Image (cartoon, rainbow, N blue to C red):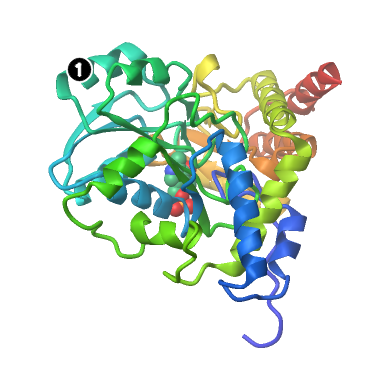
């Protein structure tokens, strides 16, 4: 391959990555500076303030981990879990399963609580398990991207107050920037995310925050954190007041995240969440008007990731291939037990907009019709438009 390369400019409506904001991509083209340059340190401080704002926290150790969302997950577990610690992981999808795998690799005394894929956990079942097992860490996914389920966390802080020795660890990879996340108010001790979902950046950084209680656990570990790269005792010194070299910060990705957070600041968290909610509601209205249904029941649906049940008789790979090749549009298929059963339609960050909702519904109508599934002409897009008009 010689000369320039030209990847297609896709419309990304899958489970991530979503389309990066053009301003974010431009920020990545800015000049390189050293990772200890006074100007870069100013950028780091600014970025940390903005991260605290979207996480809803005052935690000093609030930083981007160098790596994707899974590195954030790994950093969360390796730091607060020591071999033999009791860890309770709630599993209702792929990312809960991944958490359990990571916890196990940390040598945790692991217990899991399962809910059917497509459903959220009720508080009573969790509390019962907390009382019986008394874990050091309770881990849960806020936005389960494999199923489109939102786990309400508003009532967790009261429950956690009754279990003062348990740290609450939460995955907000698909919620941060799309749904409200309130780390301090909800009593979360360790919370991580990723840049390529609702923050509209390329993949590459994992914002994370640790509470004072989590920091205490890390400081009082009997043994060193087994991962050198993700040890917060050391990484925290680079992002804290010492600024000592640990590993080279990914400079251009840091620019990208800074710009993404500045854009969120300009839009405002409230209006941004409302935009995600409105586009989700429009999509659901369109889906119902086309005679299709959603996997998840109403109060637990994510705004950022819509799980649409595939009607019987539809060839899933063929339909998604048509969307990609003819419409330049990427949506996701199901994972694990939901493979072939759902489409995962992302409306994340920059990609969550009215045009994308209407374009997807129109393209889906064509692709379904091609396979003999009759949809009244324009039904989906018209129903979505009704939601947009009402919201004006
Ligand atoms: C995408 C995702 C991850 C993993 O992030 P990567 O960037 O793919 O490493 C973890 N948890 C959830 C809920 C996700 O959606």
Q: Where, by quadrant of the figure, is residue 111 drawn?
A: top left
Q: Is residue 325 visible?
A: no
Residue labelled with disc 1: 131
For the N terminus, the quadrant is bottom right
Depicted 265 relative to depicted 184: above or below: below
Residue at the extreme bottom of the image, as rendered: 2
Depicted 382 relative to depicted 230: above or below: above
Residue at disc 1, secondary structure: helix
Residue found at x 52% / y 67%:
249
Position of residue 91 in the picture relative to residue 300 (left or right)? left
**In the rendering, at what x and y percent does residue 221 appear?**
21, 49
Position of residue 329 in the picture relative to residue 141 (left or right)? right
**In the rendering, at what x and y percent does residue 30 appear?**
73, 70
Viewer-closest of 22 and 44: 44
Q: Where, by quadrant of the figure, is residue 319 drawn?
A: top right
Q: Where, by quadrant of the figure, is residue 275 drawn?
A: top right
Depicted 128 relative to depicted 363: above or below: above
């Amino acid at each position: 391959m010689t000369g320039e390369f030209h990847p297609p400019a896709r419309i990304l409506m899958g489970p991530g990555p979503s389309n990066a904001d053009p301003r974010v991509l431009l920020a990545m083209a800015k000049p390189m500076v050293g990772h200890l340059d006074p100007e870069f340190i100013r950028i780091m401080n600014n970025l940390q303030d903005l991260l605290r704002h979207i996480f809803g926290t005052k935690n000093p150790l609030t930083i981007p981990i160098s790596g994707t969302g899974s590195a954030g997950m790994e950093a969360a577990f390796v730091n607060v879990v020591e071999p033999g610690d009791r860890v309770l992981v709630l599993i209702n999808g792929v990312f809960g399963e991944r958490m359990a795998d990571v916890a196990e690799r940390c040598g945790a005394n692991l217990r899991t609580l399962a809910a059917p894929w497509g459903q959220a956990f009720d508080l009573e079942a969790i509390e019962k398990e907390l009382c019986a097992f008394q874990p050091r860490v309770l881990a849960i996914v806020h936005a389960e991207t494999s199923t489109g389920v939102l786990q309400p966390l508003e009532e967790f802080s009261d429950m956690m107050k009754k279990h003062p020795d348990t740290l609450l660890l939460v995955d907000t990879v698909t919620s941060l920037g799309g749904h409200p996340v309130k780390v301090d108010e909800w009593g979360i001790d360790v919370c991580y995310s990723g840049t390529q979902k609702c923050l509209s950046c390329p993949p590459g950084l994992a914002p994370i925050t640790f509470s004072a209680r989590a920091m205490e656990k890390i400081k009082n570990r009997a043994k060193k954190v087994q991962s050198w790269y993700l040890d917060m005792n050391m990484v925290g010194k680079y992002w804290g007041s010492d600024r000592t070299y640990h590993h080279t910060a990914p400079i251009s990705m840091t620019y990208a995240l800074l710009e993404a957070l500045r854009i969120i600041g300009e839009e405002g968290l409230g209006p941004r969440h409302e935009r995600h909610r409105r586009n989700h509601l429009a999509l659901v209205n369109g889906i119902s008007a086309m005679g299709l249904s959603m996997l998840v029941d109403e109060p637990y649906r994510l705004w950022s990731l819509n799980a649409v049940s595939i009607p019987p008789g539809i060839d899933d790979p063929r339909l998604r291939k048509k969307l990609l090749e003819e419409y330049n549009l990427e949506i996701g298929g199901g994972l694990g037990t939901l493979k072939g059963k759902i489409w995962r339609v992302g409306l994340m960050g920059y990609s969550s907009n009215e045009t994308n909702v209407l374009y997807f519904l129109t393209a889906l109508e064509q692709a379904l019709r091609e396979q003999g599934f009759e949809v009244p002409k324009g039904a989906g897009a018209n129903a979505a438009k009704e939601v947009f008009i009402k919201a004006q």
